[in-house]
Image (cartoon, rainbow, N blue to C red):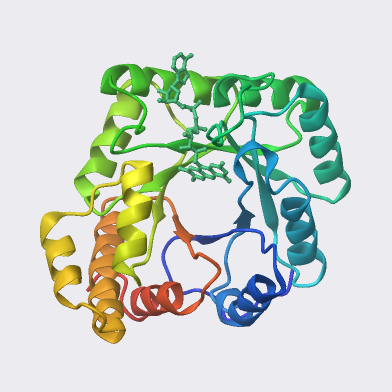
Amino acid sequence: MPATAPSRLPIPVSLEFFPPKTDEQRETLDKALPALKALNPEYVSVTFGAGGSTLSYTPDTVCQLREQHGLDAAPHLSCMGGTRAEIRSLLQLYREKGCRRIVALRGDLPSGMASYGDFRYASDLVAFIREETGDFFHIEVAGYPEIHPQSDDAQADLLHFKRKVEAGANGVITQYFYNPDAYFRFVDDARRLGVKVPIVPGIMPITNYSQLRRFSELCGAEIPRWVARRLQSFGDDHDAIREFGADVVTALCRRLIAGGAPALHFYTLNRARATTTVVERLQADPAA
Ligand code: FAD
């Protein structure tokens, strides 16, 4: 793997992309890649559309990132709506392509899709991957410091999370959040339950308030009132939003690093600037 400028961060960084489906989206990702590669990510991951809606785009993007860009690209694999046979053949394909890491998820039932498929929860998928491929893959699963949005019982959610890890996960990437105490509490609770694997915070850079609000409503992430009110007050001043967003997210990352986060996983949305701004500020001074 070609090493570019080495990161001076005390912890590794990984980056998440979604698989482009159109020429325009492909161009956007291609344009972002040089600057993102220069951050020297430990690995990059590629999301999988709900109900298999990116069934071919995800493997294509993973292969392209591996073969053309020399990145250690890991596919997301969500089981909602999928059959055992479909998932078995994707596992086979990723094995052949040299992938050793998978992000295993349940996904969400897309509107209009009636059947859950052969697996009900991510824990079933993790157990199936282990059954089929033994220890071949390093498996990451999702964690929710602010509770999974469909769960009405925080304690039960935590116990389901613990069972998912026990099914064979090697690591956890969290949903994004802007309140570091939610993450620290989640890690403490998980450790008390005996979860020992690394729990890596997912970081969502801020560039667009209406998009962030939409995402956050869907995934149950809380935008603190003071952040929301400030972002709102900038209106269409995108530079001001970016500058304030970079301040907020850099400060969040500094708290996470100081509090012992083992790595940072950035949701890049296939764009470079917001992520590179934060990482470069952290590289310049991780503890400021
Ligand atoms: P699970 O761990 O199965 O949990 C889902 C819900 O079921 C929770 O409320 C949990 O408490 C409950 N539950 C679990 N087990 C049981 C049980 N035995 N009995 C009763 N209830 C139970 N989505 C995509 O479609 N594609 C992606 O690529 C993708 N990437 C993601 C990456 C990260 C890092 C994160 C944090 C999320 C990602 N998602 C993705 C979103 C994810 O698919 C959704 O949040 C989904 O709703 C839950 O997936 P999960 O794997 O966490 O599910």
Depth check: 130 or 57 in front? 57
Depth check: 244 or 250 in front? 244
Is 236 placed above or below 225 here? Answer: below
Q: How many marks?
A: 0
Residue at the limit of the structure toward the front, as seen here: 112
Depth check: 135 or 56 in front? 56
Is 114 placed above or below 14 here? Answer: above
Instruction: Tell me which corner region of the image, top left, top right, bottom left or bottom right, holds residue 61.
Output: bottom right
Instruction: Residue 114: give x, y in percent of width and height.
Output: 61, 24
Residue at 33 percent across and 16 percent down: it is 156
Instruction: Tell me which corner region of the image, top left, top right, bottom left or bottom right, holds residue 25.
Output: bottom right
- 102 with respect to 7 (left or right): right
Instruction: Tell me which corner region of the image, top left, top right, bottom left or bottom right, holds residue 190.
Output: top left
Instruction: Residue 65: give x, y in percent of width and height.
Output: 73, 65
Depth check: 214 or 42 in front? 214
Residue at 82 percent across and 66 percent down: it is 67
Instruction: Residue 148: give x, y in percent of width and height.
Output: 36, 32
- 275 with respect to 182 (left or right): right
Is 149 placed above or below 166 here? Answer: below
- 188 with respect to 175 (left or right): left
The image quadrant where one finds the C terminus is bottom left
Residue at 16 percent across and 54 percent down: it is 224
- 188 with respect to 96 (left or right): left
The image quadrant where one finds the N terminus is bottom right
Instruction: Residue 132: give x, y in percent of width and height.
Output: 79, 23
